[in-house]
Image (spheres, rainbow, N blue to C red):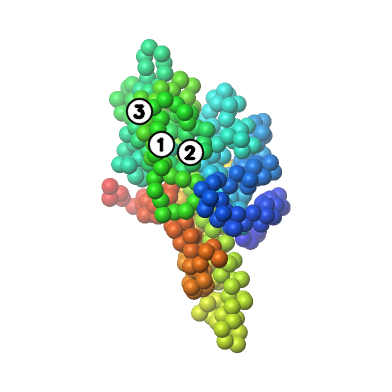
Amino acid sequence: MSTVLESEEHAALRAAVAALGRRYGRDYLTRVVSEGAHPDELWADAAKLGYLGVNLPEEYGGGGGGIAELSLVLEELGAAGCPLLMMVVSPAICGTVIARFGTDAQKRAWLPGLADGSRTMAFGITEPDAGSNSHRITTTARKDPGTGDWLLTGRKVFISGVDIADATLIVGRTEDARTGSLKPCLFIVDRDAPGFRRRPIAMELKAAEKQFELVLDDVRLPADALVGDEDAGLLQLFAGLNPERIMTAAFALGMGRFALARAVEYAKDRTVWKAPIGAHQAIAHPLAQCHVDLELAGLMTRKAAHLYDAGDDVAAGEAANMAKLAAADACVKAVDQAVHTLGGNGLTAEFGLASLIVASRVARIAPVSREMILNYVSHQTLGLPKSY
C-alpha cells in the first residue's frame, strides 16, 4: 500500500507491523485454524509491541493514537496473511466505546487489559429478526426496582469470539419513562453471568474466530454494567459502529493486498510459452486494475479514520460506509482475480488463496451489506426519499 499522504510515524508503523506479520504469515494462521486454536502467539507479540492498544488512551496503557493507527495495524497484518479479527471488536469497538463513554471505574477495569491484550471483549448487536434494522432489536433491559439491577433478555446471532472473550458488550433496549418507547443502551455482560448462554454456529468460513448464537435469559447485571448515559444510546452505539466499518475496510484491504501479491508473484514466474504469463495483458491488466481499486479504497479508508479521530462523527459515518463498501468490493475482485491467475493452483492449499474466496465475502456482508450502505448514501448524502 502506498504511503503517500501518510506521516512518517504512520509509514514507520506500517513497516514495523509488516515485519511482525512476515514472522508469522499465512502458513501460521492456516495451521492455527486447522488445529481449532487461536493465534495466541501473534496476539501476544502484537500486544507486547503496543499494536493492539494503539488507539486507546495513554493513561490506561494505550498508545494514545486513534482508529487511523489501529486500522493500519490490522491492514498490514492482513497483507501478511495473518489478520487478527478480534482487533475489530475488542480494541476498536468496545475499547472505543468504553474510552469515550465509560465510567472511570469501567475505564480502569477494562482499558488496560484491552490495551495490553490480556483481556478481550466481544460485541453483540445482530439479532435473528432485526438484521440491518437496529430499531428492531428486541433484546430488552428492565430495572429491578428492589435492587437497581438490570435484567437483560434476548437473543443475538453471528457474534464473534464469545468463547475467548472475557465479556460481551451487548446492545439492548430500555424503556423511556417519558414516551414508553424503547431506546438502545450498551451493557457489559461477563462471560460467566448466569443466564448467559452461547451456541456455536456451523460456518463454511474457516477462521480462528468462531461465530455464536447468544441467549440472554433474565441475565442479572449490576447497575454499573450500563455503559455511559442511558439516554445517549444511539450516539454511543454509532461511536462503535463507525470504527467497526473502518476496521472492516482495513481487514478487506489487507486480504486483497495479500491475494494480489500472491498472484503477481506467480504471474512473474509462471512460464508456459516464451515469456511469463504476467507479460500478457489478459493477465496483467486485471491485476493492475485490482491494484488501482485497492489503492483508491485505501485512500477512502484513511479519510474515514482521519475524520473519526478528528471527532467529526457525521462526516466519519458517511466516509466509513463508503470505505467499507469500496474496500470490500476491491477485496472480492482481487481474491477472485488472484485465484483465476493461478488457475488450478489457485484452489490448492499450497498457495492459500482458495479459503479467501469465502473469507472475502465477509467484508461485503458484515457488519452491514453494500445495499444498506448505498441506501445510506442515497438518503443521507444525496437526499433521495426512502422506500422503507
How far apart in space, not on screen, are marks 1 and 3 (Cα)?
A: 11 Å
Q: Residues within 10 Å of mark 3 (few under 14, many from 20)?
A: some
Residue 115 or residue 165, whichever sits in front: 165
Residue 85 vertical position relative to residue 193 in the rendered view, above or below: below
Q: What's the residue type where badge 1 is placed?
A: Arg
Asked if marks 1 and 2 touch (Cβ < 8 Å), the reply is yes
Q: Position of residue 209 (x, y in %)?
A: 50, 46
Residue 170 or residue 72, whichever sits in front: 170
Point out the tag, 1 or 3, that comes first from the N-terminus. 1
Badge 3 is on which residue?
217
Q: What's the residue type where badge 2 is placed?
A: Asp
Badge 1 is on which residue?
198
How far apart in space, not on screen, are marks 1 and 2 (Cα)?
A: 8 Å
Q: Report the mark closest to the observer, 1 or 3.
A: 1
Badge 2 is on which residue?
163
Point out the tag, 1 or 2, that comes first from the N-terminus. 2
Residue at position x 60%, y 87% in the image: 274
- Residue 197: quadrant of the picture: top left
